[in-house]
Image (cartoon, helix red, strand yellow):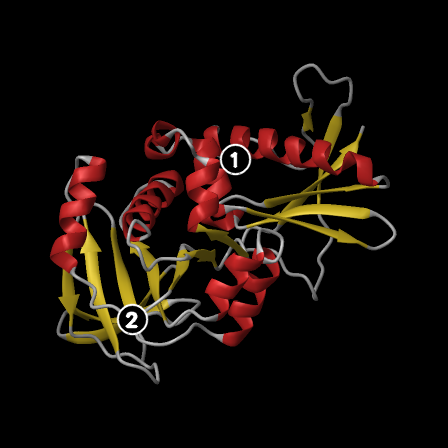
Amino acid sequence: MSLFSGKEQKADRQENGKSDKFKLPDVHIHLIIPLSSTIQFDAANFEQRYLSRWNSKMICKKAELPTEYPYRSEKFLFGDGRNQGIITYIDGPMDEGLLGICLNETKLLSPSSTEVLEKHRAHMLVEYLFGGESALERVRCAAKVLLTIIESNQSIGVFNFSGQMFRTKNWINSFFKDSKILDSLEIPALYFLFTGVQIEINGQYWVHTHGMEQFELPDMEIRVMSENEINYCKGLLFESICHNIENNGIFKPGDTFEMKGDDKIYRFKESEDLPDHPYGQFGSIEFKLK
């Protein structure tokens, strides 16, 4: 059995001479990094690069843990004394279903990005396990591990499982042209690295997020009638979500929100359940004009 089950972790605990089962909660931070070629992951080199970039230690050691992949794979435990997780290297391509989601996004970027991704040869997983007292601390830790790994020449980008979105390495590097913005890992940078914004049309334009469960918060959504309002909606989501993260989930159904300099006042309401389009563990709240 894989140590990561996709929904929960299970382990044996010895207590008063008896074996007990307990669950380690899933914090929903699961990142997939496609690679252009197969590699030998060097844990010692990762430690050195992490220390050089973040000026702090992250221990990374190979772990003899069972895997369930049809390709050669290796697992490595990482930890800094507070946060712990697993890096898994798989000597083969990622799941076809997840690859399809990634390809849909790269088509919006460039044909070359799509071609590189289609031909990827291997991939890595970063799975945060436990340790951080706050969701923001856990996300920052995962971001540091991720950004250290994708420095390698073989890294193509990252798929955020909870956020249901793919970011190419070139997109990350070009978006954060000022390395200080990325390396500071302030909330706006984490928003763009961990949160996916999707737009769907069904009579209305439905603009909504995925991935906020990584911050232990509900996703957000807004519906508008005009395509011209989409960019406004994206800005509204960005401003409100960053404020919500910074204030530990201050927004609740019934609260109101207004962007600075705007004359529109929105009220939050609990979103309707959509069985064919589920949100994360903490559901979703919707903007409605007051």
Instruction: Residue lying at the far front in this picture: please name it.
Output: 112
Pointer 1 local density, CA inside 10 Å: few below 14, some 14–19, many at least 20: some
Instruction: Read off the residue under disc 2.
Output: 38
Front-most of residues 61 and 176: 176
Amino acid type at image mark 2: Thr
Whether residue 239 can be seen here: yes
Q: Identify the residue at image location x=39%, y=43%.
A: 135
Q: Where is residue 227 drawn, in percent x and y? A: 81, 41
260 or 73, nearer to the observer: 73
Q: Quadrant of residue 189?
A: top left
Which disc number belongs to residue 249?
A: 1
The furthest residue to the top? 261
Q: Earlier in the sequence, mark 1 or mark 2?
A: 2
Mark yes or no: residue 81 visible: no
Rendered view: 104 above or below 265: below
Residue 141: % across, % down: 30, 44
SS under mark 1:
loop
Compared to residue 94, the image places residue 207 above or below, namely: above
Please provide percent x and percent y for residue 1.
31, 81
Left or right position of 85 against 162: left
Q: Residue at x 64, y 60 (%)?
A: 278
- In this rendering, the answer to whether 197 lies above or below 112 is above
Identified by mark 1, the residue type is: Gly
Which of these two is toward me, 20 or 82?
A: 82
In what quadrant of the picture does the C terminus appear?
top right
Separation of residues labelled 1 and 2 (CA atoms): 41 Å
